[in-house]
Image (tube, coloured by chain):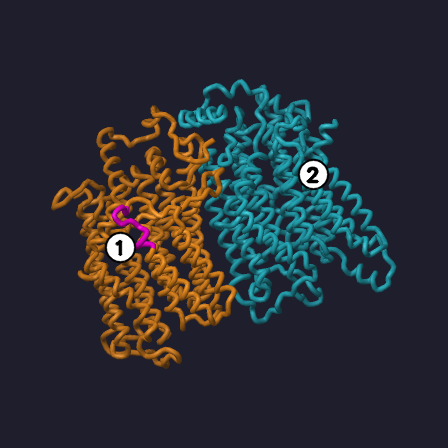
Amino acid sequence: MSLILLSLMVLPLIGAAFIAFNKAEWAKWLGLGWSLITFIWSVIAALAFFDWSDSGSMQMIFRREWIPSIGVDFSLGVDAVALLLILLTTLLGPICMAASFTAINERRRLFYASLLVLQAAMTGVFASRDLALFYFCFEFTLAPMYVLINLYGSTNRQAAATKFFLYTFTGSLIALAGFLYTGWKVSLWNGGLWSFDIATLTEYASRMSATEQTWVMFALLAGFAVKVPLFPVHTWLPLAHTEAPTAGSVILAGVLLKLGTYGIFRFVLPFTPVAVLQYAPAIAILSIIGIIYAGLICWVQRDVKKLVAYSSVSHLGFCVLGLVALNSAGMVGSVMYMVNHGLSTGALFLLIGFMYERYHTRSLNEVGGLASRMPIWAFFMVFFTLASVGLPGLNGFVSEFLCMLGAYQSGATWGVGGTAGPLGPWFAVFAATGVIVSAIYLLFMVGRIVFGPLQEPADHHAHEVLPTDLSVREISTLAPLAILCLVLGVYPAPLLIALEGPVAETVAMYDEVRANSAIAEAPPTVDTIEGESVVLLEREDLP
Amino acid sequence: MIEKLQLLHPEIALFITTCVVMILGLSKSYTLRKSCAIVTAIGLVITAWLGAISPTAGDDAVRGALFPGLLPYAKTLIPIVGLLLLAMLSGTVDRGLEQSVSRGKIFDPIRATRGEFYAFFLFSLTGVMLCATADDLIWLFLALELTSLPTYIMVAMSSRRLRASEAGVKYFFLGAFGAAIFLYGFALIYGAFGTTNLPEIRVAIGAGPVGAVGMVGFVMAIVGIAFKIAAFPMHFYTPDVYQGAASPVSGFLAFAPKAAGFLALMMIVGTIGWSHGAGGGLPEEIRTLLWVMAALSMTVGNVLALLQTSVKRMLAYSSIAHSGYMLVGLVVGPGRSDIANNGVAAMLFYLLCYGVMNVGAFAVLASLQKRAGEDGLVEVDTLDDIRGVARQYPWLGWAMVLSIFSMIGFPPLLGFWGKLMLLTSAISGDEIALALVLAVNSAIAGWYYLRIARATWLERRPEHMDAPLLTPVVSRRVVALVSAGAVVAMVVVIAPLQRASARAGQPDARPSLVEQIDEPDVSPEIEPVAMRDSSRDEG
């Protein structure tokens, strides 16, 4: 019974309450302080209390009964994937706080308290070992984000906030129906006892018949694909990103989008293997369409923030592609991508936010050649753009490469290192064109905004508080991200090894499913287990 | 007869309170008249206590009842929500008279509607509680009418504006229309089975087919009762009446007749039996009817609410939608009677959730008023009126936001757990399509609920509008806060509440069909469950 994860959820909440009942002038310092404490504590926890050699199993477990009648527990635990994403969350917390010091001048308490509540909810999503708790935190992230966009965003913020809320809310309600269906089926095999324990569900959900799995998969994807966002349901994202305040964009790109890919990794893949095997090519095609289509949109985009927002759609496509490759390389790459994208795109949003604070415009037509005005800013801009493009030596390269490698190997019949899988080299080929497009538009953006002739808005006057170039505070928000990008780019090995563990189980599961279907030409259905005795699960509340 | 009286102790207590209040209201003494509210509250507390100890499953007094465990749950729930409603309703009527009397004018009992107002309120609640005890069609009819008749008057006298009278008349005529329909249905049922006693009808249905006359009777009864719960196709009056009546009375209308209607529907539908119930089957006609009513109530309510600018009308349409949600539980039926499968329990639980969060939202509206030209102070109504309330009155604003978010079904608030129970029961009752309709509708509802929440919480008051003022009645504000607090706090005790509702929604095994239950008529998938259940019983 470890209280560490609980403390990581509760600490920000205490901070939020603290902020709510203190002076507005102190809000930013309290927010920064609390999130820093949480971050340091999370790093200590990850280094001291997590056994990285056993990264695939759930650790730091905490469990209390909550609603025994329907088998809901308050149950926490992390493996390496979840822990990494929690670390990303806690890292971005103080960075967002520090980045908002001058940008937010109204209703400050609500702003910083919302950020902390959001952090608690996101930590809860990654730390949940109970589906109900997961869903609960997953939904709860909407409320503070809604407030952040609606109150602190730019002109069109209300429409953006509403669209964001309703899009994701609708999706997750359908996902809830899928979850409950899974829960019900499992309860039937469990003597009528409901359980929302993720491990239990994972173990038994794959026994559903192929048709059921298909429906459940689509229901869950309705929730998670919207969040990622996958190609046809991505339209909320550019709007939300463009209108959100800087801190909101950073959190949105850095962590909230990952809730979708994490959901796919944690639930869709293990719950519905047969359906995923069947539909993986379709999902992969959607993500490739997303990669290329969003990339082409970026190319013609004049609003820098929108450009980066669309680039998120494009990049998250790689993430999903890696996941549905269903092999070790693809999945490890995908998880790496979640972290890397959070770092580099989060930083890009920060940089654009800093520029916006100085020039009050995001249009490529109005600003340009800022390298001569803001050399430090320009340095970071180029650095993070290259990380985002996937320059070898920086973090983006490792994960992008692994995702494409995974797609290539998955089901490859020619070339080297082929494994059984639903995709194939062609998927990698098309995804690779996406890399080229992404290089084009990102470098084009950098070329315009950083280099080229100096151009500033006509009515531009220097910000009253901010220096021309980045202040120490602003640099200190970017520096840690830059260092991490470099470290993860040069020496990702320990992380890759740690991620092998959690991924291995899913990969093994798919190998087994493939083997079964190869033997019987039929997926395991309810009928195949009928001969077995009643499945009894370990639950303390059995009479 | 004596056993029957034992079941009615809470109602008797409530009735005595009603008489006392009615007489007190006629008194010349201001102090005595003022005590009406307190006496009513005391009466409700005693009733809740009597309700809590009323006979439950296993007791001789409730042998043969459809839902033997229902009484304690229903008869505690109704007076407790009644207490919230009372605090919201108090002070609605004729303060002008009291002022003129205190200035020395002679007291005129004809004008003193205050005592009557409480009496009507209590009459109505008595009717609701009687529905829970009903085992006879005539009883059920009387109970339903006892619920409704006082509400017609309450609507009309809730405010001195013309709109209230109009709403009262409209409500009365349509109510009479609804009552006529279900009374005709009852008559047909009697014609088909030769008895008005529900357990006897149940035995008769168990013995043979329902027959055309009986089926028409049941259909008409259900459609007629749909008026009480404001469900499709009898929902048309809702927005006009809710908007016309004063906010506290609208809040009352959204709970009391609805609770009565759902209890009555439980009895009527339970008489026929559920498709997954103990050995019985809900006839396809009834199932289709309820299915369509549920789906359309949700959809119509939510979609029409999108078009409104008046918060009261939005809440009225949303109350139609909430009825639709609860009907889902009724379609599913008690299932295998586990908490997760029992649709009736989910419905009863949702009734509790809805009662609390609905009172919260209406109490906030009731606490605020605005100046409107020559009309003097009128209550707030439109979205513009409540814009920026949270800045001016943070507590009220938060109460509204919490109530509204709970209605959206946002975790971790109370409404979420209500919806979760409905969804789990619908899915385990194999009503997947209905569960999806419910999920999609919750999302549609998010749209207009968010508009309310955003207007109160995040937006600013338009420049040209005056700030809303607080009504002098403190208890309304208190009840808004209490309800909003309950929406959060009840989450902690969610497990015992769900257990209580599951006990209440546990149906009595159909007497005539007991032998058939043992036949292996269950699908192979469920077989392990049956084995498991029996082994648990032995252990």
Task: Say whether residue B93 is magenta.
Answer: no
Q: How crowded is the residue under tag 1: few (<14 C-alpha within 10 Å), some, or many (20+)?
A: many
Is residue B426 shown above or below B110?
above
Q: Would residue A48 be counted in the magenta stretch?
A: yes
Picture quadrant where residue B198 is located: top right
In the orientation shown, which residue stands out farthest toward the left? A415
Instruction: Name the residue tied to disc 2.
Output: B50
Q: Nearer the viewer, residue B533 or B279?
A: B533
Magenta residues, as a range? A45-55
Which shade is chain B?
Answer: cyan
Q: Is residue A43 toward the left or the right of residue B133 in the image?
A: left
The relative height of residue B328 versus residue A365 in the rendered view (above or below) is above
Which residue is located at x 39 percent, y 54 percent? A122
Q: Are the residues under marks 2 and 1 on the same chain?
A: no
The chain identifier of the residue carrying mark 2 reads B
- State whether residue A18 appears in this view: yes
Within the image, what quadrant is residue A203 found in?
Answer: top left
Residue positioned most to the right: B106
Question: In this rendering, which labeled residue sits more in front, label 2 or label 1?
Answer: 2
The residue under label 1 is A337
Three-letter amino acid code of the residue under disc 1: Tyr
Residue A56 shown left or right of residue A200 in the figure: left
Give the residue drawn at x 71%, y 28%. Answer: B3
* SS for callout 2: helix
Label 2 neighbourhood size at 10 Å, few (<14), some (14-19), many (20+)? many
Q: Position of residue B508 (x, y in %)?
A: 59, 27
Q: Output the chain of dot 1.
A: A
The N terminus of chain B sits in image quarter:
top right
